[in-house]
Image (cartoon, rainbow, N blue to C red):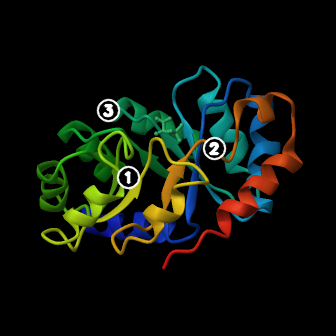
Amino acid sequence: MTAHDLSERMAAICARAPVIPVLVIEDARDAAPLARALVAGGLPVIEVTLRTPAALQAIRAMAGVEGAVVGAGTLLGGADVAAAQAAGAMFGVSPGATDGLLDAGIAAGMPLLCGTATPSEAMRLLERGFGVAKFFPAVANGGPGVLKAWAGPLPQMRFCPTGGIGAANAGDWLALPNVMCVGGSWVAPRQAVAAGDWDGITRLAREAAALRRD
Ligand code: 3PG
């Protein structure tokens, strides 16, 4: 599969919902009920960051939840791609992009959402055949005005901004023509997960799923 094909698959995943919940899971037993809560609220695309010992087990558990499209985040290289794929991840997210990561994703046939913070990084991904990227860290890098400016010279590149986005500002990003969806942790607050407040998380997911992409 070519990078372009994988990029189209990533775009199709990004088109499924306006928000990708970004999860840091401490206890793999929370994974399945959390995924069910998010899917019930209308957010089927879920990123589990590989930042905790429980992450791969959580991906395994979530991959079995009906309707969930589970990806692995914080992929830093080829070994992470292999581990994520073995756990059942259907896509991968990274804070950046290295040749090693891109090559591993292409070899594994895993759609990737790689991080960009400058036009040169976006151009490099385009050169490699990737037309969809994460914009990270979105708010700290300057906010929606940056991607609005990039849409002029780089109209073919589409983004999933992530980092510092919440219910109050997600709409500003989603209004941009080059934004497909946003990522964020706000829909699954750690306290709510620890308390097993799945109904509360479904409510947050429902609000996020109702955000418009104009
Ligand atoms: C992260 O780094 O964990 C993601 O970018 C999510 O960021 P957020 O917690 O600001 O939504």
From the viewer's perspective, is 50 left or right of 205?
left
Quadrant of the snapshot with the N terminus: bottom left
From the viewer's perspective, is 72 left or right of 96?
right
The x, y position of residue 56, in whole percent, is 60, 32
> Which image quarter: residue 6?
bottom left
Residue on which the image places disc 2:
186
Tell me the element at label 2.
loop
Q: Nearer the viewer, mark 3 or mark 1?
A: 1
Q: Residue at x 66, y 40 (%)?
A: 60
The x, y position of residue 51, in whole percent, is 52, 25
How many numbered dots are placed on residues in this image?
3
Tell me the element at label 3.
loop
Residue 211 visible: yes
For the residues labelled 3 and 1, say whether their Cβ atoms are less than 8 Å apart: no
**Position above or below: 157 against 107:** below
From the viewer's perspective, is 186 left or right of 10?
right
Tell me the element at label 1.
strand
Nearest to N terminus: mark 1 or mark 2:
1
> Which image quarter: residue 67?
bottom right
Residue on which the image places disc 3:
77
> Which residue occupies the foreground of this view, 181 or 39?
181
Q: Residues within 10 Å of mark 2 (few under 14, many from 20)?
A: some
Residue on which the image places disc 1:
113
